Image (tube, rainbow, N blue to C red):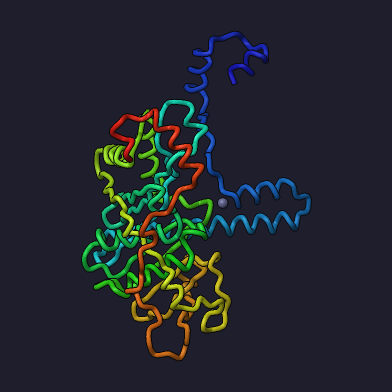
Amino acid sequence: MYELYIEDKNPKVSFQFFKNVFYKHFNLRRKPPIKDTCNKCDMYSAQLNNSQDENQQLVLKEQHDTHFENAKLARDQLNKDFKEAKKNPLIETLCYDMQKVLGLPKLPTNIVYYKRQLSIFNEGVHSGSTNTPYCFLWKEGMAGRGAQEVGSCVKKFIDVHLNKGVNELILWSDSCGGRNSNIKIVLMLKAVLMQHPTLNKIYFKYLESGHSFLPNDTDFGQIERALKNQVRIYTLHDFRSVIGNCKKHNKFIINLMEPDDFYSTENLENQILNRKMTINKEKVNWLKTKIIKLEKSKPDSIFFCESHSSEDNNFKELNIAKSVRSKKNSLNPQKLKVLYPRGKPISKKKWDDIKTLLKFLPKDTIEF
Ligand SMILES: [Zn+2]
């Protein structure tokens, strides 16, 4: 702006003077551009700008408004669920999300930019009842980063950290179809529910994609700011101590995942039939689903709802039993087996790259 001002042949002033006037006398501020804008919002504004047809513009505007309303409904409901968890000891609300992958080793040496690195995964879980952030960490080679891994972290949270006596668990996440709303994570949590001493209901609730700002994002922001100040990070334990020290109050509770913490849902999937139609012959649309409900008293059913608005909270029931007439429960929760008992091999190319980085590492980190 200063350069444009000078170019415009205005009275000559110093940059400092210009800056002072700008900040003191104009009610203007600049912010860095938002990195992740919403795909849908961007699409609607681009189409609206391109469209000449008034009717089409109206339709686009209406669709965009609905998208905004849905985002707001979800956000309001998330806040309600958080408040509820704070005051009601029988309810817990959790938000879960995966942090951007960290590549190790982190080195100032520029060769690192051209090499594949070992990925470190962090599944963040934020508890609504205590407002505490939890981390579940593991390295590539132990497991991947799919729905079963995410589900296993949530399972571990329930096994180790869930407050005693909770009977209703509400799980919020973004609506990333692949990881969060597929049959694998639902079945894993169904198995957890069937065996849990107090839990009666589990809800999966999904934020509107593109507007899914979760408390986890604030948690990750704190970790990433601390990471920026670290020039060198070699091992998972180094990363762990960065996370452990990045907050003064309400510190992260860190869990290191072990190979036998990761469960496969393959056996469970084989025990059920993932039908396309509900018991009332309505089509099941996983991508449109906003809430999935599991009830302990209904082990053969999954309930779907396509709205966060409490007025039309009607759930469609899906029966997943192989034989609908059978009296026996189809799901045997004891059948969860370990996902990768001997680890999940990393690619040869990556392994070769990592080996070329060993010469930059201190001796005591090479074993890792
Ligand atoms: Zn949007």
The x and y percentages for residue 149 are: 40, 58
Screen quadrant of the C terminus: top left
Relative to residue 171, is residue 176 drawn left or right? right
Of 262 and 246, which appears nearest the observer? 262
| Residue 309 seen in render | no
| Residue 241 seen in render | yes
The x and y percentages for residue 50 are: 74, 47
Residue at x-position 47% and y-position 81%: 319
- 216 relative to 151, above or below: above
Of 298 and 19, which appears nearest the observer? 298
As drawn, which residue projects farthest toward the right?
52
Relative to residue 224, is residue 129 drawn left or right? left
Of 193 and 126, which appears nearest the observer? 193
The x and y percentages for residue 295 are: 37, 76
Relative to residue 231, is residue 41 drawn left or right? right
Screen quadrant of the N terminus: top right
Which quadrant of the view contains residue 170? Answer: bottom left
- 235 relative to 230, above or below: below
Residue at x-position 68% and y-position 46%: 46
Residue at x-position 65% and y-position 47%: 45
Residue at x-position 74% and y-position 57%: 56
Number of numbered discs: 0
As drawn, which residue projects farthest toward the left?
164
The x and y percentages for residue 37 are: 56, 44
- 9 relative to 176, above or below: above
